[in-house]
């Protein structure tokens, strides 16, 4: 069994893990102790893409002496094998984000055509801002009463429809370039064109990875990485960015708001519903349904005082940043939320949902409700209520009602940890513009100015998952605190954002506790936290846009690769993280991963990712397990970029 105190730095997690063990409920923490990973897979050199294998090519214990003669049956080198495995992770990650984006685009188009009552256009301003990127005009010229020409706004729903059609077209586009590539700084876009890596269409690049990594196709790791680049740009600047933009238009662009986080947000005498997964299409409707007076009355008729709706994983970030609704916890807390005995329903859609929640739920009264036709759980105890956006609110009401009906079935008193923390969240790149600018129009110039004068040393993007192979939240917090101490402002998303929230780093007051003097001064003057929560993992596209705004504001070079900035995923685990890492790298960012990367068994491929890519893209991969060293490497890179810009350390 796992030692609770050695498993997490988060008190609520430690308490609930101990309770799970008392209740004889096995969790991922216990299995991480009893099951060790395969060391060949860990090195990235196990090939199972044809049935002559799996061919396993571990690094020799004494290292490679002389020529590396390892080969699979077909002759595949460790480089080819590791590169193919890596590429398939990029493909899966890009597919996950982009399929999410496709779903959003489909609903957006339905809404634009007024084919649903439940979704509409909330942020017209943002629609008008992005329309030109899709070459959609926002005005028309009409004849005035005296024959003169007058420019008139087009109907907002007409604009939306055209944007929707063009956005959705980005998935199936066969050639040309995806529209958003041009949003990157000019130098970056031109570099991509020169290297011939601008994605032709989002789906096409993902499919091509699957083809190239089939047995006996692409056997040059440089060329495989090039295709990874196309698919990853198609994710970050394509599928993910479209998801973020259209979600903002339909549900509102996040602006700073307060929220609360950790298992302590659950309430003993309330119906507790957790929405877990990734797509706000569902959770937005559950937000509406759970606040309807007849639903609240129904909950009261069952003996509850009200309804708590809390999020988990990136769905949580979506509803938190837009509505200030509480977060129950990050990825590694999903089983433990159920262990409280207070969760009446856990509603899931797609991604990062552990199959074991069904087993844990069996031991308590919690109903697991799957909602997406892509994602079911084979278990006698999960309920599937399919969510159809044409009937969204009705479906959401059915889900909320199922949770309420389950409230009387609790097994006695629940045990809810008291831990919860307040935080300020919702820093879309538009909001950063406004806040740091502090003027009516806002701009990124004040941020740049503070970087130039050295109060802020640089920018760190720290994102990504939890991983049961490393102590929960520990590496996240060490990396972030080390950056803050060295005056590096941190942009965050995903499960890192939640780790920071639980540790109090998302409050403006934390600036004077954790930051170096320069960063503390800036945060206190502006009244922002030193760690800016920008949303879910698809919202890493906001970080790309923020970086682009910083470049455009001037004074810090011409490209993202010139900025004193670095990226990090200290506790990554999902394939999505690999796609994100790669689009950051090829956008010009030095990107460090913790835990381990399955490339170490293929030294030449590793060198390509860790060193040679810098010469091509100005950004490169790195892997450093020790979180303190990890942060130091980021700071060294930031200093290198400062020096190149002629700025003091
Ligand atoms: Ni991102 Fe979000 Fe968390 Fe990792 Fe999973 S929730 S999309 S993949 S685990 S950060
Ligand atoms: Fe082995 Fe080659 Fe088949 Fe991979 S493709 S399993 S290395 S024979």
Image (cartoon, grey):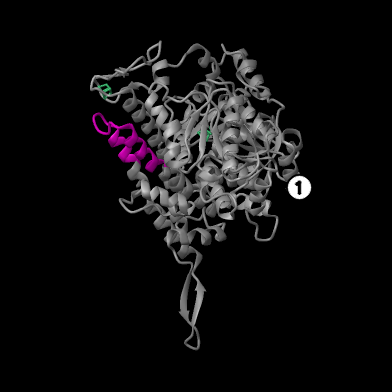
Read off the magenta span. 206-232
Residue at the image point whose x is 51% and y is 15% from the top: 31
Is residue 228 toward the left or the right of residue 536 in the image?
left
- Would you say residue 174 is visible in this rendering? yes
Q: Nearer the viewer, residue 398 or 340?
A: 340
Instruction: Give how far across and how far down residue 71 sits, in percent.
Output: 28, 19
Screen quadrant of the N terminus? top right
Q: Position of residue 452 (x, y in %)?
A: 65, 47
Asked if 374 appears above or below 378 in the picture, the reply is below
Task: Decide: few, some or many residues near mark 1? Use Cα within 10 Å; few <14, some 14-19, many ≥20.
Answer: few
Determine whether the beta carbon of the residue marked 1 sits less than 8 angstroms from the nearest atom of ligand 1. Answer: no
Q: Position of residue 289 (x, y in %)?
A: 58, 45
Q: Which residue is mark 1?
A: 525
Examine the rendered structure and indicate whether residue 411 appears above or below residue 260: above
| Residue 462, above or below 175 | above
Question: Percent from the top left, x then y, of residue 7?
Answer: 60, 18
519 vs 637, left or right, is right
Q: Using residue 625 as the reference point, say whether residue 306 is left or right of it.
A: right
Along the line of sight, which residue is nearer the eye, 61 or 443?
61
């Amino acid at each position: 069994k796992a030692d609770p105190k050695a498993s997490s730095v988060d008190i609520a997690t430690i308490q609930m893990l101990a309770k799970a063990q008392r209740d004889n409920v096995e969790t991922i923490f216990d299995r991480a102790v009893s099951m060790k990973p395969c060391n060949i897979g860990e090195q990235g050199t196990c090939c199972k893409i044809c049935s002559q294998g799996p061919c396993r090519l571990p690094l020799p214990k004494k290292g490679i002496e002389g020529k590396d003669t390892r080969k699979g049956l077909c002759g595949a080198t460790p480089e080819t094998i590791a590169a193919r495995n890596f590429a398939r992770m990029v493909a899966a990650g890009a597919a996950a984000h982009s399929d999410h984006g496709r779903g959003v685009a489909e609903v957006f188009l339905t809404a634009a055509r007024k084919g649903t009552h439940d979704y509409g256009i909330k942020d017209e301003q943002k629609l008008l801002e992005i329309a030109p990127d899709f070459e959609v005009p926002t005005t028309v010229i009409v004849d005035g009463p005296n024959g003169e020409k007058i420019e008139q706004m087009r109907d907002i729903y007409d604009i939306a429809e055209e944007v929707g059609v063009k956005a959705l077209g980005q998935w199936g586009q066969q050639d040309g370039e995806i529209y958003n590539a041009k949003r990157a700084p000019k130098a970056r876009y031109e570099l991509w064109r020169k290297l011939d890596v601008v994605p032709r269409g989002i789906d096409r690049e993902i499919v091509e990875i699957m083809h190239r990594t089939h047995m006996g196709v692409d056997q040059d790791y440089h060329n495989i990485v090039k295709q990874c680049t196309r698919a990853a740009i198609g994710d970050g600047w394509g599928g993910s960015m479209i998801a973020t933009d259209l979600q903002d238009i339909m549900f509102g662009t996040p602006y700073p708001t307060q929220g609360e986080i950790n298992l302590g947000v659950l309430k003993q005498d309330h119906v507790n519903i957790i929405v877990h997964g990734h797509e706000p299409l569902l959770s937005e409707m559950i937000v509406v349904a759970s606040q309807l007076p007849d639903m609240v009355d129904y909950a009261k008729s069952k003996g509850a005082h009200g309804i708590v709706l809390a999020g988990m994983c990136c769905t949580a970030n979506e509803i938190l940043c837009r509505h200030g609704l509480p977060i129950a916890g990050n990825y590694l807390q999903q089983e433990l939320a159920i262990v409280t005995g207070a969760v009446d329903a856990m509603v899931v859609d797609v991604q990062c949902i552990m199959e074991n929640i069904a087993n844990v739920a069996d031991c308590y009264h919690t109903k697991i409700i799957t909602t997406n036709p892509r994602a079911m759980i084979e278990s006698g105890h999960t309920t599937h209520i399919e969510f159809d956006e044409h009937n969204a609110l009705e479906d959401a009401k059915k889900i909320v009602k199922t949770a309420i009906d389950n409230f009387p079935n609790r097994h006695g008193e629940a045990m809810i940890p008291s831990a919860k923390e307040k935080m300020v969240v919702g820093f879309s790149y538009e909001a950063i513009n406004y806040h740091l600018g502090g003027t009516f129009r806002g701009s990124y110039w004040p941020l740049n100015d503070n970087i130039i004068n050295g109060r802020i040393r640089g920018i760190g993007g720290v994102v990504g998952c939890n991983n049961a192979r490393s102590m929960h939240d520990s590496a996240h917090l060490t990396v972030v605190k080390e950056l803050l101490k060295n005056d590096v402002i941190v942009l965050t998303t995903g499960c890192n954002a939640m780790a920071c929230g639980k540790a109090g780093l998302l409050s403006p007051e934390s600036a004077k506790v954790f930051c170096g003097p320069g960063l503390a001064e800036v945060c206190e003057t502006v009244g922002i936290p030193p760690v800016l929560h920008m949303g879910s993992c698809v919202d890493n596209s906001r970080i790309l846009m923020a970086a682009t705004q910083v470049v455009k504001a001037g004074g810090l070079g011409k490209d993202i690769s010139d900025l004193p900035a670095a990226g990090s995923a200290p506790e990554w685990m999902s394939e999505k993280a690999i796609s994100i890492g790669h689009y950051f790298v090829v956008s010009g960012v030095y990107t460090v991963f913790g835990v381990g990367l399955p490339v170490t068994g293929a030294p030449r491929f590793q060198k390509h990712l860790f060193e040679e890519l810098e010469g091509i893209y100005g950004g490169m991969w790195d892997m450093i397990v020790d979180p303190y060293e990890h942060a130091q490497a980021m700071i060294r890179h930031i200093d290198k970029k400062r020096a190149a810009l002629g700025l003091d350390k």
